[in-house]
Image (cartoon, grey):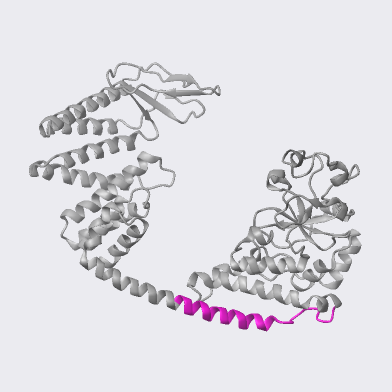
Amino acid sequence: MAQKKTITDEKIKAFKRLYVASYSLILAFEEEAAKTGKMLEEKVDQAIANMDEMISMLPMQFPTIMEGNNKQQMLLINLKDPEDEPERIATKNKNGYTNYSVPGHVQMLFEESVHMALESWKFQLWSQVNYLSKDPTVLAKYKPLLLAHAKKCMDNFPFKATMIEWERNLYLQCANKIGWNAFLEEEDPVKQEEALAILEKGFVQSNWYQFSYLKDTKVRLLIKMGREEEAYAIVLEGLRRNADHADFRDFKTDEKYLQWIRKEEEREVAAKKKEEDDYQAFLLFVKKEQEKLADQFVNPDHPLVKEHAAVLNLIKQEMLQIKLRTQYKDSKWQTPSSKFDKWFLELKKWSVEDIAAYEKEHTIHLPDQLKVYLMEIGEGGKYYYRYNGVTIPAKKELAAIRKPFPITADKMHPINHDWEINAWVEPNDKDWKKLKILPKSADMQAMFGFPDGVTANDGCWYFGDSYGQDGLFLIMNGEFEGEVWVDTLQYGAEARGCFAQATPQKLHFLPFLAESLRHKSAGYPGNEYTGSWM
């Protein structure tokens, strides 16, 4: 519970009296304005004076400390009786947690934000006067005060991403007020530019779902300043998102805007054609660059390189395409961006001697396709794939990798897999029978079980994740040596979670990587139906 102290500080008592008095003055002003339309200026001026006096009393230490955060100190004010010392009401919810609330007539102020809250109160009061009054004399008095205060609030409380809702609203309303007034009344071009610059500070924080009124204000001000093209671009975006956007309905019959739209559509068609032409030229450039890589090997005479030359060429060419696409995409296929240079550093190639030494040192046999990949492509390259490149397993993983891979063909069974392949599942998972995927009579231990101490992760090397973030494994030995498998066991029987080949074609390491790269270039279209690509 909050730590509560009896208030003896006369400064805080005076603050509470001023706050309640201001609240009462504003109520009287609002009631009179609603009944007669008359602005009780003396009430407004006295409320503002009270707020200024409260601000002059800051900083002050509030007496109540919220539980769990000694820095969050607060003051509770009974708006009906400033001498009262109200407390929050504690209630326990069904989970046993304590919730706190205050009655509707109690205002809760926080020490860290009370200054901004009081300045916001002044802004809201002056905004009410300017909205409700039709009297030119009243507006001449209060509008300059409102606009000056709006700028003061923006200067004193600059926008922060950590602002809570009411703080953000104040900042954006202040920006909008200055911009809208410039649209309505300002004729000086210099002051219009100044107002637009202030409005822009709020505009950049708006979107089409929140605070879209700032977009309307900017449109109107830009048109007044003779910058129709900038304004129309905002209108076009809004109407494309919502053809009945309330703020922009008038533009749908505005002939000047409609003429601009027709020209803009012509520009868009021309720009689209140019981008398509540039893209086709880019593809031709990529093709020529890929051709230069053909049969350019570090170890051209090695038997494994000769055996796998075609797929190695394909891997290198697809990697080049991914690199070039990444570098050229931001410029719409015209020039490369240097910001991606660090992404595509040279992969670390292994020599024949490095591989032999590694196998000898760790008493391990590497599959041939892994060997030739390390020799001609290299270790690393995370940006060529979805999540990670190819790296050699850590030493602590090698003990399990050396073991025989325990899954054999007789441990693989039909499970209604989407690819119509047999798979291995956990022998203790009873859901396969409950869901009638396997018959009740099935002996799952006999079908899928291993001897004690043996696991499905023996004899295989986890080398990365698929597009769907499922583990990919290279089978290191046994009758499935060289194949790439995917582990989806975590999804359970309902989603046919299993351990099996990562592709319907049961691809081995090099073809799997080549196809993964091709799918990366294409944006993984239909990924879940064609394979668990890396």
Position of 497 with respect to 13 (left or right) is: right
The picture places residue 492, in percent across and down from the top left corner, at: 71, 44
The picture places residue 370, in percent across and down from the top left corner, at: 80, 66
Q: Is residue 475 visible?
A: yes
The verdict on residue 393 being magenta is no
The picture places residue 106, in percent across and down from the top left corner, at: 33, 23
Query: Is 184 above or below relative to 345?
Result: above
Please state the extent of the stretch shown in magenta in the rendering.
275-302
Nearer the observer, 246 or 79: 246
Q: Residue at x 79, y 44 (%)?
A: 426
Q: Residue at x 38, y 49 (%)?
A: 209
Q: Is residue 195 visible?
A: no
Query: Is 107 above or below relative to 208?
Result: above
Q: Residue at x 22, y 46 (%)?
A: 148
Position of 200 with respect to 412 (left or right) is: left
Q: Residue at x 88, y 66 (%)?
A: 357
Position of 263 with respect to 453 (left or right) is: left
Nearer the observer, 168 or 8: 168
Q: Quadrant of residue 388?
A: bottom right
Magenta-colored segment: predominant secondary structure: helix
The picture places residue 320, in percent across and down from the top left corner, at: 64, 74
Query: Is 414 above or below relative to 291?
Result: above
Nearer the observer, 317 or 199: 317
